[in-house]
Image (cartoon, rainbow, N blue to C red):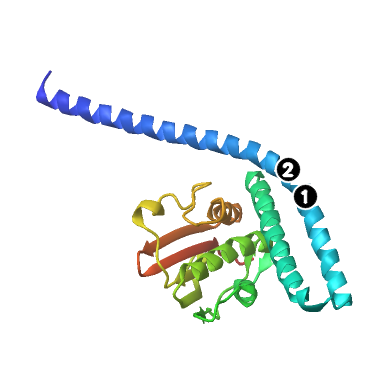
Amino acid sequence: MLRGEKEQYRRDLEAHLEELNLLQQELARKEKMAALGQIVGNVNHELRQPLEVITNAAYYLKMQLDRNEIGPIKKEFERFLTIISDECQSATDLVNELLDFTRKKEAVSIRVDLNQLLESLLQRAPLPETVRIKRRFSRKIPMVFIDPIQVSRALGNFILNGIQAMTQGGTLEVATHLTRKSVEVVIHDSGEGIAPENMRRIFEPLFTTKARGVGLGLPLAKQYIEANHGEINVESRVGIGTTFRVSFPRLQAA
């Protein structure tokens, strides 16, 4: 075999191996998604009813506490009831997230002011005293045609992730920009950043580096953005921070 033919053979072999590797990864992803679907059904069945019973019981006990003074243990009752309620809500949110992830996303789109949508999300965000918000909203942002519930969930996830990434405090910058073809939302935190080896996996279902959670927040947010014909790009540097850049098509003038 000639030298040139050997080189071509080597390149072809490497290409086939790369293709095989990609096929194996896709197969593994589909198997994981199938397993996730089964898990969702089991979780929904096993958790829904006891969560509803616990939530209702906690609500009833709190009503009784509000009506009657029961001495020094009242504050302890209230503290534990709050813990029960919060944990029930977290578990309920998890069940809903799992169910939502496996459903096909169909956007119910209307004309939305992105600046107003973002302001509403920031007003509701759980903001620690050590984190401040810097708004850079463009006054020229036109209305966009999106599903406000889906997009709110996606952008709210990016905002919450940014806040949680700034464990030592910092600044969350939220900006809107207008380009020739799109309307952009930029969410930047000055937090810990994402390690390079994790960057390619952040939208992978069930991948997470957090102590709590199942790794569906970002994949679900990506589904929402794409269901609304949007695009998302992420940039991050360890110790510097992370930037989520989301763009939606501009409405064409009638």
Helix, strand or loop at disc 1?
A: helix
Helix, strand or loop at disc 2?
A: helix
Q: In the image, residue 247 lies at what x, y percent?
A: 51, 63
Residue visible at 64% across and 48% down in the picture: 98
Amino acid of disc 1: Pro
Residue visible at 60% across and 75% down in the picture: 122
Q: Please say whether residue 106 is visible from this viewpoint.
A: no
Q: Quadrant of the N terminus?
A: top left
Residue wearing tag 2: 46
Number of other residues with Cα within 10 Å of mark 1, as a class: few under 14, some 14 to 19, many 20 or more: few
Q: In the image, residue 10 lies at what x, y percent?
A: 21, 28
Looking at the image, which is closer to me, 195 or 100?
A: 195
Is 100 above or below relative to 184?
A: above
169 left or right, relative to 221:
left
Q: Please say whether residue 150 is visible from this viewpoint.
A: yes
Q: Quadrant of the C terminus?
A: bottom right
92 left or right, relative to 58:
left
93 left or right, relative to 220:
right
Amino acid of disc 2: Glu
Residue wearing tag 1: 50
The answer to which quarter of the image holds residue 63 is: bottom right
Is 28 above or below relative to 125?
A: above
Residue 148: mark: none
Task: Evaluate if marks 1 and 2 touch, with contact meaning CB atoms under 8 Å apart.
Answer: yes
